[in-house]
Each structure stands twice: as C-alpha cells, then as structure tokens.
Amino acid sequence: MSIRVVRTAAELRGLDGTIALVPTMGALHDGHVQLMKHACPLADTLVASIFVNPTQFGAGEDFGEYPRTWDADLERCEEAGVDAVFAPEVATMYPHGLVNQVMVDPGPLGAILEGEQRPTHFRGVLTVVAKLFGLVRPDVAVFGEKDYQQLALIRLMVETLCLDVEVVGCPTVREVDGLAMSSRNRYLTRDERTRAVALSQALDAGVAAGPHGPDDVRAAALARLADFGVVPDYVALTSPDLGEPVPGEARLLIAARVGKPRLLDNRALTLGPDALGHAPEGS
Ligand code: PAF
C-alpha cells in the first residue's frame, strides 16, 4: 500500500501545493468515500484525517466502543484517491490534556436540536475541527450534509473566526432502501436495521407534504415513524440555516434512537407559498 500516513504537524508541512481535507473519525463507509472523491479534484493534495475525537463524546456515550477499523480504512482511502492520511495521537490534538484548554463555544446554534440532547457535543466537534484546520492548513474542507447541524456550525465557525478555509457540503449517501450511511449503522441488529428505514421514509413523507404547510409536514413524518414504532427525539422543520421555517426552501431533520444507535437524517424541502398562512408576496 503506497498511501502515506502522517502523525505530526511537522510531517504535514511536507505536503505539496493546495490541500483538500476530509475530516473523519474512521470506520469509513461509502459515504466517506464519496466525500473523498468529491474533494479529490478540489486541490493538489487530498488529506483524510482519522481521529476518534474524545471531546465530542458525552459521559456514557460510545467513545470506548466507537468502531476502529484501521486497515480497512486505509484501503478505502487509497481507493478514493487520498494522498495522505493524518492520524494523530490524542496528545498531538490535545497537548494540554482534555480539560485544561481553550475550547470553541458553538453559541446558540449549538444548543438546539442535537445540542439539546448532547450539550457538550458541538463544543468538542468545533474544537477538533478548528485544530485540524490549524494543523493541516487546508484550502478546502469537505463535510457530509448528513450531519447537517454540524455542517452549519462549521460554516458559522469559519465565518465568525475568519478562518481561511472553504467549506464544501456533500449530499447524504444512502443505502438502497434509503437509510443514510453512518458508521453507527453497524450497531443495528437485523430487526433494528429493518426499522431504521423509518427515518428516510418519514423524511420522504414530510417532503411530499411540503406544499401543504408545516403542520402537515410534521404530521406526515411522525405518522411514518409511528408505522415503524420509532419514537423520535425530534422532528424539526427549519429554514436552511436552522432558523424558523418560512415559505420556500426549508429543512426537515429527524433524530431517533433505533435500538442502541441514535440515528440522524435530514432532507431539503420546499414549503408552499402560503404554507404558513402568509399571503403570497404581491397579493
Ligand atoms: O463527522 C465526523 O465524523 C466528526 O464529527 C468530525 C467532523 C470528523 C469531527 O471529529
């Protein structure tokens, strides 16, 4: 295998030309491969980082058992055209330890939806992404839309902290039956895997109800989840930037536990012009 594995900041300085970065926590699947393929033509050198970031896991979450599949991950990176895999030690990412350090505060956008369920999660995500940007110094970084709130927060961080990185979002990659690909899908038992399709079907139902307004969107999504006996943590209808929905482009986001894993999914949708009871413009 010819792929280069890089562990330190000094080794990263030896990379050539412009850099595209795909940050990951490993346990790579076809969704990650698509991110890498998308990133490949965007710069001279493609770096994928593999780092299971301890600070984004809350107490009692699955940090210890998060799947670590190093050999298979390297093969996938190589197939996808990655030039170098950055796989730092915890001490490289957190030289002052996990507690005694500066962390990025995600602000109010980090406190809603996933942030309500996992109050310290986005603080850990933004901190590690900022560190990866500082170490790898990418020109462009590619993230999946599956973690939509994460992508929105990374964009906001880049803008707010004036980081000189172009952030590119890529559409969610799905299994044949619609389930969004995720490293945590491997926790699903056979029965749970069958029920996990509830999320994408609920999104389909919600999207189809878009022209009829927010109440119908939520009702359609909830009904489909109930068909599968799935109780969501939330079904949220928002504007594309996660604010209040208005007629036009919107986002529907669902999180639900199916057995052990908590699954997330989301879709873009269009709310009809008078969907919120607003008079259409010009009338
Ligand atoms: O989406 C992920 O895999 C992680 O949250 C990320 C962005 C690599 C940060 O650890």
Image: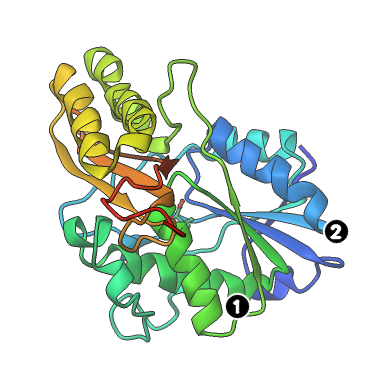
Mark 1 residue element: helix
Taking the spot 42% from the left edge, 70% from the top edge, the residue there is 126
Q: Amino acid at mark 2?
A: Asp
Q: Quadrant of the C terminus?
A: bottom left
Q: Rate crowding at label 1 as few (under 14), some (14 to 19) or many (20 or more) other CA atoms within 10 Å.
A: few
x, y (%) of residue 206? 32, 32
Give the label on residue 44, or none. Answer: 2
* Residue in the foreground of this view, choosing between 141 and 244: 244
Whether residue 130 is visible, yes or no, is yes
Kind of residue sitting beneath label 1: Gly
Q: Position of residue 153 (x, y in %)?
A: 43, 67
In the rendered structure, find residue 5 and report the number of the disc placed on it.
none
107 horizontally vs 162: left or right: left
Q: Where, by quadrant of the figure, is residue 217 drawn?
A: top left
**As rendered, which of 44 and 205 lies closer to the eye?**
205
Rendered view: 176 above or below 73: above
* Distance of label 2 from label 1 (alpha carbons): 18 Å
The residue positioned 40% from the left and 53% from the top of the image is 280
Residue designated by label 1: 134
Residue drawn 31% across the image and 45% down it: 275
Q: Secondary structure at mark 2?
A: loop
The answer to whether residue 228 is left or right of residue 271 is: left
Q: Quick one: label 2 or label 1, which is nearer the N terminus?
A: 2
- Where residue 237 sits in the image (x, y, percent)? 29, 48
Q: Is residue 102 left or right of residue 46?
A: left
Camera-side residue: 116 or 17?
Answer: 116
Against 1, residue 8 (above or below) is below
Asked if the residue at label 2 sits under 8 Å from ligand 1, the reply is: no
